[in-house]
Amino acid sequence: MILPIVAYGATILRKISLPIAADHAQLATLIEDMWETMYESNGVGLAAPQVNKNIRLFVMDSAQIFTNREEEDEVYPDAPGIKKVFINAKVLETGGKDWVYNEGCLSIPKIREDVTRSETVTLSYMDENFVEHTETFNGMTARVILHEYDHIEGKLFIDYLKPLRRKILQGKLNDISKGKVKVDYKMILLK
């Protein structure tokens, strides 16, 4: 089932999400719904707070980036990407060079901005079967993971922008929080 995406301005997007246990009610259905919602919305990642669930869960598919991108000179070390579920993730370390990439977010439609993130991330997490993993990711995959991880920590990509840039965008952000933006996917306004 396709779930509505929570629009910028909702308090759930600013909360630190809660850990979950293997017996979390309807977890398999929620994960399936999140995949369906993410693909229907043309996203490459989706965190539970974006579908109004205050839990430490996100899904991501960086393989789509490599499949759908046009020929570029840029080579990413993580090609062809991965598709994974992350439950109760905890960043253990970031490293490598910081690099800039133009990011967007399903909860903040029609706004894309350059964001600086680390080249690598090491995290512990559980998969959809609650098998524990500690793994290091790099390149575009690391970027998507860090973006989605921020969601379960109550952060948004716009938090990385300089104050002047945020001020310039404030009118557009206000419009999103009031529902004055057209998108090709279901969106919900919450306070």
Image: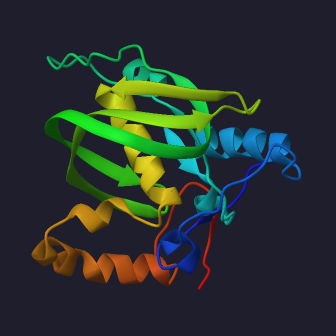
Relative to 66, say whether 186 is above or below. below
74 left or right of 12 in image: left
3 left or right of 13 in image: right
Relative to 32, say whether 155 is above or below. below
- Residue 78, by quadrant, is top left
> Which is more toward the observer, 12 or 43?
12
Q: Which residue is drawn at 65% across and 62% down?
A: 18
Relative to 88, say whether 10 is above or below. below
Q: Residue at x 29, y 22 (%)?
A: 70
Q: Which residue is drawn at 66% across and 56% down?
A: 19
Can you see residue 24?
Answer: yes
Relative to 190, say whether 150 is above or below. above
Image color mode: rainbow
97 left or right of 68 in image: left
Q: Residue at x 66, y 46 (%)?
A: 37
- Where residue 26 appears, as percent x and y from the top left, is 88, 49
> Which is more toward the observer, 22 or 175?
22
- Residue 75, by quadrant, is top left
> Which is more toward the observer, 158 or 55?
55
Quadrant assignment for the C terminus = bottom right
Total numbered circles: 0
- Where residue 89 appears, as percent x and y from the top left, is 54, 44
Can you see residue 42?
Answer: no
